Amino acid sequence: MAAIRAVLAFLAGLQHLRTAAAGSPWVYSDNALIPDGTIRITTLGSGSPDVRKEQLASGFLVEVGNKQQDKFIFDLGTGAYINLWATGVPMAQLTKVFITHLHSDHHADLASLYVGAMFGRRQPWEVWGPSGEEPQLGTAAAVEGLRQFMAWDTHARRRIDLVGRKDDGDKVVVHEFDHRVKNQVVLDRNGVRVTATPVEHYRTGGPVAYRMDWQGLSFTYSGDTRPTDTLSQLAKGSNVFIMQNMGPIEDLAGLSFESQLLINTSHITPQQAGAIFAATQPRLAVAHHLTVNAASRAAIIQDIRKGYPKGELIINEDLNVYEITRNSVKVKRRLVPPRSWGFWHAESNWQQQQQKQVLLSEAAVASL
C-alpha cells in the first residue's frame, strides 16, 4: 500500500513533499470527517508579499471535529485560494472568514472566494475583521469595496442557470469589531470561541491577533505585528502558536534606511520570537510569514533558539498541517492534486468526482 501511495504521489507531481518530516503521515484531500476532539489547521500560504510558487501569501483553513464539522478561514492572502481549492473542501462549507488586517497578502484572495455561489455555496458567507482608525479603513468598508468590485461578476453569473436559483450564496455578512478592545470574544458558536486582541503593525490602528478555543484545545495566530504584551497574553498556553516572523535582513536590500527601519520595527524578528515563545509556552511553536530557503531556514531556527532553546518548533510551509488533540499535536502534510476538480455541483457530486479521480490514479498505477 505504501508503494502505491508513493507512485501516486509521483504521478501527481508532488515530489516537493519530500521535505516532510521522516515518517510523518499525509492528510489526503478526501473531505473526510474531522475526528471528535480534533482541530486541524492547514497552511494555505506561509509566505510574505513577495509571493512565489512554493510559498503563497498567508492563509489557514481550520477544521473542527464538532457535530457541525465547522470550518474556518483565517486570512486568505495572494494565491492562498489555490491551496484552499486543492484541499477538496466543498465551497458550501467555507462560509466563515477571519481577517487579521487589511494588507493584501492577508486578504487579496477574498475576491476568488466571493464567487463561491458558482461552486455550491447556497448561504451567505461571513467575514469577521477589525475596524480601522477611520470608517473607510475598516473591514466593513473593505468588503463593501469588494462587493462593488464584484458587482458585474455577480450580476453576470446570476444569469447562468447554475447560480440563477434564488439563494444567498453570493451575499456576504460582515462582523466588524472595534480593533482597540483587548481579548474580546468575536465568535461563540457551536462550542467554538474566537477571541481577538489588538496588535501593532506599521504604526496604523486596526491589526488584530486571533485565538480559537474548543473543548480545551486552542491555537493562536498573530497576524502581522511587532512584539506586544497583548499578543503574549492572548497566546499564553496555546496548543499551537502561529507567529509571524521577520525574514533575513538581506530581504530588505535596496530599500531606503527609513523603509528598513519601519519594516524592522513593525514585525517580530526571530530572536524576539524566541523570547515570546518562551514566555507563552505553546505545545508547538510555528514561525510563519517567512520567505525561506535551506540556508535562511537554519539561520532563522538558530536565532529563535537563542531565546527558546527547548520546545517543539517548526518553520511553516505551504500545506503543512497541525492536528491538535488533547494528548498531542501532530505535524503532517496535506497531499493535494496539482489539478483539482472543479466544484461545479453540490457536495455529493464533488464526492463522486473525487472517487473518479482515485479510480483514474489507480488505473495509472495498474498500467505501469
Image: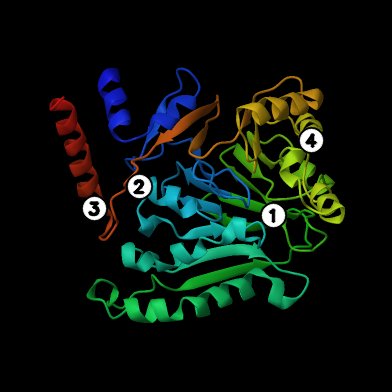
Give residue 196's mark.
1
Estimate the x, y position of residue 232 in percent, counting from the top left. Answer: 78, 41
Vertical placement of residue 42 versus 124, above or below: above
The residue under the point 61% across, 39% down is 218
Disc 3 target residue: 348
Residue 193, position as x, y percentages in the image: 60, 50
Q: Which residue is mark 2?
A: 88
Total labels drawn: 4
Nearer the viewer's eye, disc 1 or disc 4? Answer: 4
Q: Tell which tag, 2 or 1, sits nearer the viewer.
A: 2
Q: Which mark is residue 276?
A: 4
Find the distance from the CA under tag 3 to the CA under tag 1: 35 Å
Looking at the image, is mark 3 or mark 2 earlier in the sequence? 2
Mark 4 vs mark 3, foreground winner is 4
Crowd around label 3: few <14 · some 14–19 · many ≥20 (10 Å): few
Q: Amino acid at mark 2?
A: Gly
How far separated are the C-alphas under marks 4 and 3? 45 Å
Amino acid under disc 4: Ile
